[in-house]
Amino acid sequence: MSVTNNNRWAIAAVIFCGIGVPLASSSPTVFGVALALGVLLLLAAPGRLELFLRFSQGLRSPLGLAIIFSFLLWLPGTAESPDLGRSFSIWGRMVGMLVIVTFIHYFLRRGGVDTCLRAMIVAALFCALITLLGLYATSPIYGLFRGKGWVEVNTAQILKYYGSALACLAPAVIWAGLRLGRRWLFAGLLHLAAAFAIILAVDSLAGLLGLVAGMVIGSVVYVCQRWRLLGGRAAGLFLALLALFLLAAMVWTLDRLPTLPDPDQIIDRVYGGPVETEIPTSLVDAHRQYIWGFSLDKALEAPYFGHGIDISNYLPGASVLVAKFNQTFIPSHPHSWFLEIFLETGAFGLVALLAALALLVHLWLRLGATSPSTAAAGIAVFVAFWSSSMLNFSIWSAWWQGVFLVLTAILLAAALRDAQTSPLPREERQPPG
């Protein structure tokens, strides 16, 4: 069954899937509700059996197997977690979330991508308008949108989290406008301008980093693939060199992080000793260096499988107050997805995740042969998410993961539909996965 058959359940499903991420501006809960309604509607639409069959086929793809392998390697650390219930519930929640977005992906591959994209653009512009009015005109407008009623609210403070979501959403909206053409492209450009204005207004450094990095790297990938530079290998070479540079920067940083203070310097769970850093604080603030240093030291205590998912701030010593910062060693999470994954799932879990991410990037590069703009947008969303995650939320945050997974599912569905209808010879196409 295709949405083009005008089935009302299918049309409603793709619309709710499209408006979900923009509605995170109201609250992460509203995003979750929209997504849940979309999934329920797509399961109510005809063709459920085919959907489940495609889902089972996807599990056997290289990317599907890599994801399964990652989850399996996260289990040993979860079993040793000091809070088994917390760690296992988040592990299970992530499994459920991946199942949901996989269903969305295969549903959109049968049809309705353009309907989904129109809904996403309209919702993104509407939410941007409400947000800008709340920031620059009168805050009760946003208070009403937030569900608090017509009351004064600190819109900038509440919406700081949305800056990171916009970093991922804006490239997807621009791509959707390019795909749909004409007035939709104008709408996409208008949303990009609004996204920058909102990110600056809410002072989201993570959002600004993600959006700039995503747009710049996505643009480079598009140019490389659109003109097939170096025989189509330029984009892959560029990303490989970038990854090596980032790895070198990470090693350099980790080697210069401060070590844990001696226990006799901690009195009544307060560390009042000196704060010394090797890395210039103009690059990384001193407190973040101590957060990372504590995380690295704890990670090396359980280097293979980690301490368990989402328990970093519950580990012994994590709640010790550093007097100079008036903050604990880990206020809520390690503020680095790389260290958080290493600390909580160990080296095996980290390497497995990196391998799965590498396969996702490789898939995008292969799809660039038939859909250069879609592949570039997919990589832009990828870069925006993982670069923002170095500065903002815990990597286990459900709504934050949802932003990345839903947008990726939509873009992959569009790219794979393009690959199926491409005029290129069959051997040059990306086979459905």
Image: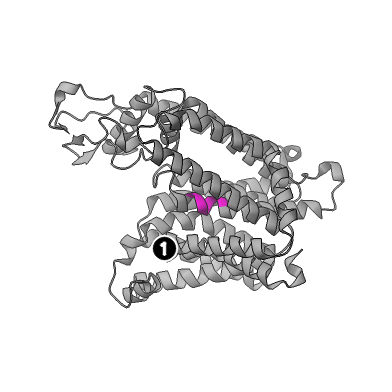
Q: Amino acid at mark 1?
A: Ser
Q: Is residue 7 magenta?
A: no
Question: How many numbered circles are shown?
Answer: 1
Question: Which span of residues is magenta-colored?
Answer: 401-405
Q: Residue furthest bottom?
A: 150
User: In the image, is 322 to the left or to the right of 207?
Assistant: left
Q: Residues within 10 Å of mark 1 (few under 14, many from 20)?
A: some
Q: Is residue 403 above or below residue 307?
A: below
Colouring used for the render = one colour
Q: Is residue 403 magenta?
A: yes
Q: Quadrant of the C terminus?
A: top right
Residue at 40% x, 73% y: name it.
Answer: 145
Work out whether residue 397 can be spotted.
yes
Q: Is residue 19 above or below residue 277?
A: below
Work out whether residue 138 can be spotted.
no
Report which quarter residue 200 is drawn in. bottom left
Q: Main secondary structure of the magenta part?
A: helix
- The residue to which callout 1 is attached is 27
User: Looking at the picture, how far across and down is residue 177, in whole percent?
Assistant: 63, 65
Q: Nearer the viewer, residue 183 or 310?
A: 310
